[in-house]
Image: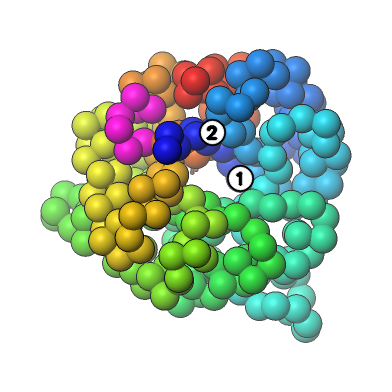
Amino acid sequence: MKRTKIVAGNWKMNTGLVEARELVTEIKGMIKDEVNHEVEVWVFPPFPFLSAVSGLLKDSRIGTGAQNVSSFTNGAYTGEVSASMLNSMDIHQVLIGHSERRQYFGENYEILKEKTNRALDAGLQVIFCCGETLEQRESSHHFSTVETQLKESLFHLSSDQFAKIVIAYEPVWAIGTGVTASAAQAGEMHTFIRDILVQHFGDSANQTRILYGGSVKPENAAELFSMENIDGGLIGGAALSSRSFTDIVKAAK
Ligand code: PGA
């Protein structure tokens, strides 16, 4: 079965309410035809704007997801947002393990495992991010780094649970730097990821979508997306412009 490509926009800690509304209204207006059964498009606005954005997308096929979720179920955890809260507001996707969360918020394998468990318990679909630093790549530890990230936080899942996971490979050295992994570098890592997933979860992992993230732009998207195991992209900077983002969606067709 052919894997449907996904183009996801991670807005990070950007936009205000007015800009968020404008951005999503423009995106919605610009990609109607392309989204029609050919590409799944998801946007990940900041928490306070989830409701406004998902409201504006109600009558479209574009999904709205959250950038983070608590590793706890509910209760006295000031400032946290639980998976069931997201589910209760019709938010069905969540990013887990983004390198910025690992780097600035101390999210380790165990925390990311718990976050994944909470998200799956609440019926959310997870985009689980992995990727090596420049130092790890230069010392030839990129494959083992990514393998450990996946093993430690995801390999406790059953194949059925794993079916709700989308992987995003995002080399840290390519995030927000303007430096993109070459199609060959990304393709090589995606094939490696596919192999270890199939080894562990079996044949069903051939259906897992593996996205590439890290300075994807309209100019390099088509080449990256043409690689066998690259099933779309997780877009940061370029997702903040409706023109660039929708051009990237078109490249995934
Ligand atoms: P970038 O970010 O496209 O700005 O490199 C990607 C991401 O962090 O998801």
Query: Is the residue 187 above or below the residue 142 in the image?
Result: above
Residue that carries the numbered disc 1 in the rendered image:
12
Q: Residue at x 70, y 23 (%)?
A: 27
Residue 250, percent from left and from top = 53, 18
Query: Is the residue 220 above or below the residue 73 in the image?
Result: above
Number of dots carrying numbers: 2
Residue 58, percent from left and from top = 83, 36
Most frequent secondary structure within the magenta stretch: loop
- Identity of the residue furthest to the front in this view: 1
Mark 1 residue element: loop
- Residue 151, magenta (yes or no): no
Crowding at dot 1, Cα within 10 Å, few <14 / some 14-19 / many 20+, comes out as some
Q: Earlier in the sequence, mark 2 or mark 1?
A: 2
Crowding at dot 2, Cα within 10 Å, few <14 / some 14-19 / many 20+, comes out as many
Look at the image and tell me whether residue 175 can be seen.
no
Q: Is mark 1 within 8 Å of ligand 1?
A: yes
Query: Is the residue 162 above or below the residue 220 in the image?
Result: below
Q: What amino acid does circle 2 point to?
A: Val
Is 184 on the left or on the right of 8, as rendered? left
Mark 2 residue element: strand
Q: What amino acid does circle 1 point to?
A: Lys
Which image quadrant is residue 215 in?
top left
Q: Residue at x 56, y 28 (%)?
A: 39
Magenta stretch? 224-230
- Identity of the residue furthest to the bottom in this view: 76
Check residue 7 in the rendering and tell me which mark sits there, or answer none: 2
